[in-house]
Image (cartoon, grey):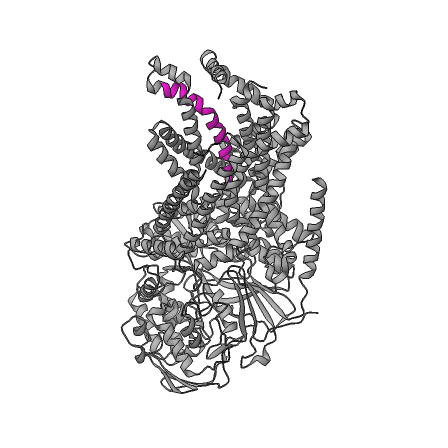
């Protein structure tokens, strides 16, 4: 018995050694990254999240593609485009050599089909509204209009004309976005709308194509030889993992098992921050607390008083949070629109000042926090949100004498209660969809789909609407500035910090850039590995 | 159970009712592991009761002036500090309160549900009894995880939900034990005898049945408390534990137990982990000792 | 015997049916919905989605539709989160992973646990006994989420002889190539089970050693090893069998902690994810898999009893 056991152990150990040798033997240029979570879908029309888009941009290509560094639109399937003088009609010239990985050609019809499919009510695409800039699109999705009335016209085989509802200055930059990517009609017709992107059916038109998909494990992409610009693609293989544990993922990176992974847990920040593999890029996103200002739902009426809200805002020591808790180079936020928005400077409506905050609180009738009752900070369960909430709770307690409490809820319940305005103060975050202040400001209009604060301001609504039709970029930005001023004076939200995109990248990876959307096209990435 | 055995039990019960427990206690004292366990339990119970006196800082206090996040253990902070610069010593001390109360209160919740259910089932007519036991079988067939997660999510994350949530999935075994005990005892000769001389039903239950069933139940209880504390730690791992800034040993260990924390700041796992493991060890050792001491099948042979 | 099997079969069907029903309505009663996200969607789009997944129908209708698909097509329905995948597909992907890790862990736990328990029982109150009993208590006193990182720290980061978690398939690296990825999950997962089995084996053996028939056998002058294997082992294995049965159903449906920390695509991790994501159909699929396993394992245990303990009669 004992002998056999010993033999068993020896054999097992030998296997281990043999196994370790077998791994790490390959001469291809392989890029291995952890995407953090399992993609919900690879149908570009259906997808909404960043992890999904990260994969989609490697295997699909829209009319334009992101420049990996500047995010400016590069010619994709479209070779060139023109815009009419009134900014309403866009004409795209498509290249003739774009095709799917099964050699089926891509033309203007492909795009018309794909966009109409994304809009169609039966597709039930959550991001259909990303296409609502197109004339008649919203009505079609809502079942009030017909597909024929949507402003997408095939002029000839390789010319596509799009008519918009209103001039939309950022429309071209949307062409690289997931919802505007083409989908293969010939495959969808054959296997159905829900199965075409699975491993056995999928065809791709991007630099890479999908060959393996093990849910919650990994996805393997290989170079797509039929891609029109395949000559520039250097990686032969991309492996995308779906590991949610950041600590393990980082350890795998350190062991050389990954080329790229996102996030560094706080307890490792000091060790990693100084390494050349560490990156913290400015990100187009704001971390903020929102205050329920819906008089019918707010249970602590003191929060309906703007002076109280201002006092709370002013007594958060953002520098402390950023430097001692977050540590990755996040930027303290005193406005809602992030500072890296090109051509726009956010309105700064307040400064941190504990003395003044105390005075404001006293003016509102709550000197030293007396009579104000308790304020519960509501956040979704996560170590990151917990740290911030614990610190802010102590700040309000120590600086203002307010009895602050914490309540965390699991994600879906948190969303549910937020939407029903069932909270006092809640943590939230917003990541811009595109590079324009509009993506941060139009959400706060009265009853806006994402306005979970219940805040409503007529002047604000008018300004946002006016910006929609303003052609002159400078005037447009001025209107946004006016709007943000109102938002930052009424303070239904408390900006806390601007996100950074934290990731680690092996030094031998070249052609990989950081940018404010955290999007990394791998088309021209290569490895300088011996 | 043989006739001889039963008679011995009646003898013990009727003639020197106290000595059964005194006997068990004497045997328990001989078991070194169990005594060690008891000492640990008493120690941490005292810590929990006098947490306010022992802990140098409140558990949630953050000093915004000094930046002492992740400080190593020192004379100022014997257990070091956490990611907010809070004193880990104080947090572990206060953590004992939460961990122990979750363990004890939840076990009591499970006990109350289980004993009531098991007793009703044991006394009920056989049809009802069968149905009630089938329900328990079905509950065993539902993954425990599913139950707890749903309960925690559905009824909000108030701290008392931890007691109810874990308690609601831990009572089934107690119910089975209680029922089993009652069934064996109910058919016992001395109960028959007591009935025949006209002892009232209530007296029967409280004088005879419960005192006899209580041994195994207490044993099970002491072994349930550590398993509940472990479950609480597991819920903390999933993010469903106690509401911050309060912390249990489990939630402290969750944070300190990540790979990065173990590598860089081992004090974050060592202290809460040690407290948790020691207590669980103590309770398990004590519970097992208690079982050996109370187990009637061992009684006459050692 | 046959009568027993038939009866058990029908009662199992009722049990499963009740479990499905309870679980179905329970998960639907939980607040939150599968499609909510940080960015809210317009009402009309939401309605389109509801229609697509039949969430616009009354709950009882959805329930009957679900039952119908389940019973007549053995179809768990489409996943709410992993679009395009059916729950059947997903379980086919996840279950073998957990099954492999779980069964290997259980085998190791039984081998080690029974050996440790025997050594402990035969060396009562000697060093071996104290050592293994302390080990057995410790094994159930340290949370899994501490054990796994410690293993990683020692073998993957310190000694660098094992990979830092992750998972490889036999189709990619061969069976031998999988072994390094299996060692940490298997050994950490087997720890608490080893501890339980050690305790149980010891208790079972102690019970039997004191029984009259062993004393008689000894008195008759039977060899110690004969007594050990013919009488004591057989008798003391009964509690272990009754424990291993249901525990097996638990271990092969995956450990959340092990799978999550190591990034292993198994049932346990996915189950928790599915519950948090309100992926109703996947949660149901997991619950049903687990329940079926539990019922089957209990059944197997009952049959095994008959072989191990002649006193058991099927009735």
B241 or B145: nearer the viewer: B145
Which residue is at a point 43% across and 32% down the rendered structure image? B176
Res. A526 image quadrant? bottom right
* Residue A319 in view (yes/no): yes
Residue A257 location, x and y as percent?
Answer: 63, 61
> Which secondary structure type mostly characterizes the magenta part of the structure?
helix
Residue C123 location, x and y as percent?
Answer: 67, 28
Q: Number of callouts in the render?
A: 0
Residue A364 location, x and y as percent?
Answer: 33, 52
Which residue is farthest bottom?
A156
Q: What residue range appears in magenta?
A: B204-230
Q: Is residue A65 magenta?
A: no
A326 or B138: nearer the viewer: B138
Quadrant placement of the C terminus of chain B: top right
* Residue B52 in view (yes/no): no
A414 or A222: nearer the viewer: A222
Which residue is farthest top?
B15
Which residue is at a point 49% across and 65% down the rendered structure image? A51
Residue C232 located left or right of residue B6: right
Residue A355 located left or right of residue A26: left
Q: Is residue B214 magenta?
A: yes
Residue A123 location, x and y as percent?
Answer: 36, 69
From this view, report whether residue B146 is shown above or below residue B179. below
């Amino acid at each position: 018995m004992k002998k056999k056991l010993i033999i068993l152990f020896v054999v097992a150990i030998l296997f281990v050694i043999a196994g370790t040798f077998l791994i790490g033997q390959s001469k291809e240029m392989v890029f291995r990254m952890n995407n953090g979570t399992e993609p919900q879908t690879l149908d570009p029309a259906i997808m909404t999240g960043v992890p999904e888009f990260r994969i989609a941009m490697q295997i699909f290509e829209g009319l334009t593609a992101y420049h990996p560094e500047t995010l400016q639109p590069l010619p994709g399937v479209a070779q060139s485009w023109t815009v009419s003088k009134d900014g309403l009609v866009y004409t795209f010239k498509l290249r003739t050599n774009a095709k799917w990985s099964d050699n089926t050609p891509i033309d203007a019809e492909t795009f018309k089909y794909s966009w109409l499919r994304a809009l169609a009510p039966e597709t039930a695409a959550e991001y259909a509204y990303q296409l609502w800039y197109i004339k008649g699109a919203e009505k079609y999705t809502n079942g009030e209009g017909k597909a024929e009335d949507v402003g997408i016209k095939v002029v000839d085989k390789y010319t596509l004309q799009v008519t918009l509802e209103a001039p939309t200055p950022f429309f071209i930059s949307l062409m690289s976005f997931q919802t505007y990517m083409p989908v293969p009609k010939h495959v969808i017709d054959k296997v159905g709308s829900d199965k075409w992107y699975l491993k056995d059916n999928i065809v791709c038109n991007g630099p890479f194509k999908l060959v393996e998909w093990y849910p919650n494990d990994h996805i393997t992409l290989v170079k797509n030889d039929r891609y029109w610009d395949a000559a520039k693609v250097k990686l032969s293989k991309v492996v995308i993992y779906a590991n949610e544990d950041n600590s393990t993922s980082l350890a795998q990176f350190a062991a050389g098992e990954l080329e790229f992974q996102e996030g560094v847990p706080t307890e490792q920040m000091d060790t990693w921050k100084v390494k050349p593999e560490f990156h913290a890029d400015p990100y187009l996103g704001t971390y903020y607390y929102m205050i329920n200002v819906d008089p019918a739902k707010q249970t602590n009426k003191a929060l309906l008083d703007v002076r109280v809200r201002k006092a709370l805002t002013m007594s958060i020591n953002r520098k402390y949070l950023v430097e001692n808790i977050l540590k990755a180079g996040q930027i303290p936020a005193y406005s809602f629109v992030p500072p890296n928005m090109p051509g726009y400077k956010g309105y700064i409506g307040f400064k941190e000042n504990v003395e003044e905050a105390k005075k404001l609180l006293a003016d509102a009738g709550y000197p030293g926090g007396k009579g104000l009752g308790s304020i519960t900070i509501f956040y979704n369960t996560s170590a990151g949100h917990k740290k911030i909430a614990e610190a802010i709770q102590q700040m309000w307690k120590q600086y203002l004498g307010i009895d602050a409490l914490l309540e965390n809820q699991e994600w879906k319940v948190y969303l549910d209660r937020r939407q029903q305005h069932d909270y006092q103060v809640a943590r939230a975050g917003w990541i811009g969809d595109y590079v324009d202040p509009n993506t941060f400001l139009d959400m706060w209009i009265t009853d806006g789909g994402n306005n979970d604060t219940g805040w409503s301001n007529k002047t604000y609504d008018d300004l946002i609407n006016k910006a929609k039709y303003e052609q002159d970029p400078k005037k447009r930005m001025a209107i946004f500035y006016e709007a943000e001023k109102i938002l930052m004076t009424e303070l239904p939200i408390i900006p806390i910090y601007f996100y950074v995109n934290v990731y680690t990248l092996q030094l031998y990876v070249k052609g990989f850039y950081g940018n404010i959307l955290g999007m990394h096209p791998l088309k021209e990435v290569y490895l300088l590995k011996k | 159970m043989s006739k001889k055995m039963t008679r011995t039990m009646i003898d013990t019960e009727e003639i020197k009712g106290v000595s059964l427990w005194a006997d068990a206690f004497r045997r328990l004292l001989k078991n070194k592991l169990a005594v060690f366990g008891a000492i640990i339990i008493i120690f941490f119970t005292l810590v929990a009761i006098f947490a306010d006196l022992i802990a140098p800082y409140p558990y949630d206090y953050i000093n915004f002036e000094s930046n002492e996040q992740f400080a190593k253990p020192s004379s100022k902070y014997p257990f070091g500090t956490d990611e907010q610069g809070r004193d880990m010593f104080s947090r572990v001390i206060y953590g004992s309160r939460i961990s122990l109360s979750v363990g004890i209160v939840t076990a009591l919740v499970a006990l109350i549900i289980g004993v009531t259910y098991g007793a009703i089932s044991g006394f009920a007519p056989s049809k009802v009894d069968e149905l009630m036991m089938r329900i328990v079988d079905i509950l065993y067939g539902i993954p425990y995880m599913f139950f707890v997660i749903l309960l925690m999510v559905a009824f909000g994350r108030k701290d008392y939900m931890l007691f109810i949530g874990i308690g609601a999935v831990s009572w089934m075994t107690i119910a089975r034990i209680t029922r089993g005990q009652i069934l064996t005892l109910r058919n016992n000769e001395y109960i028959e005898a007591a009935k025949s001389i006209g002892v009232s039903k209530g007296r029967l239950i409280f004088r005879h049945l419960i005192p006899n069933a209580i041994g195994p139940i207490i044993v099970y209880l002491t072994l349930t408390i550590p398993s509940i504390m472990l479950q609480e730690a597991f819920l903390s791992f999933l993010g469903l534990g106690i509401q911050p800034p309060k912390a249990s040993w489990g939630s402290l260990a969750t944070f300190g137990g990540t790979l990065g924390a173990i590598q860089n700041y081992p004090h974050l796992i060592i202290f809460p982990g040690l407290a948790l493991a020691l207590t669980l060890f103590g309770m398990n050792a004590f519970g097992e000792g208690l079982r050996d001491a109370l187990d009637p099948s061992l009684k006459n042979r050692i | 015997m046959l009568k027993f099997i038939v009866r058990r079969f029908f009662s199992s069907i009722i049990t499963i049916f009740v479990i499905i029903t309870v679980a179905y309505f329970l998960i639907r009663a939980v607040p939150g919905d599968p499609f909510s996200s940080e960015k809210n969607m317009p009402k009309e789009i939401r309605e389109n989605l509801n229609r697509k997944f039949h969430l616009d129908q009354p709950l009882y209708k959805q329930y009957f539709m679900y039952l119908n698909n389940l019973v007549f097509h053995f179809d768990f329905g489409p996943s709410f989160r992993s679009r395009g995948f059916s729950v059947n597909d997903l379980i086919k992907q996840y279950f073998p992973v957990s099954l492999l890790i779980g069964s290997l862990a259980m085998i190791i736990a039984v081998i080690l646990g029974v050996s440790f328990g025997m050594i402990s029982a035969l060396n009562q109150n000697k060093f071996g006994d104290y050592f293994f009993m302390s080990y057995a208590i410790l094994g159930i006193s340290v949370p899994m989420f501490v054990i796994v990182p410690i293993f990683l720290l020692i073998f993957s980061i310190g000694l660098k002889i094992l990979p830092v978690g992750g998972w490889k398939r036999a189709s990619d690296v061969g069976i031998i190539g999988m072994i390094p990825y299996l060692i940490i999950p298997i050994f950490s997962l087997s720890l608490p089970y080893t501890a339980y089995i050690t305790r149980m084996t010891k208790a079972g053996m102690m019970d039997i050693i004191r029984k009259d028939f062993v004393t008689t056998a000894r008195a008759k002058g039977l060899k110690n090893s004969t007594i050990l294997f013919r009488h004591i082992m057989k008798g003391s294995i009964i509690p272990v069998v009754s424990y291993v049965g249901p525990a097996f159903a638990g271990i092969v449906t995956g450990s959340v902690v092990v799978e999550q920390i190591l990034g292993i695509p198994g049932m346990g991790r996915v189950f928790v994810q599915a519950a948090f994501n309100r992926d109703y159909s996947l949660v149901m699929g997991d619950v049903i898999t687990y329940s079926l396993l539990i019922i089957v394992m209990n059944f197997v245990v009952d049959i095994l009893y008959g072989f191990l303990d002649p006193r058991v009669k099927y009735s």
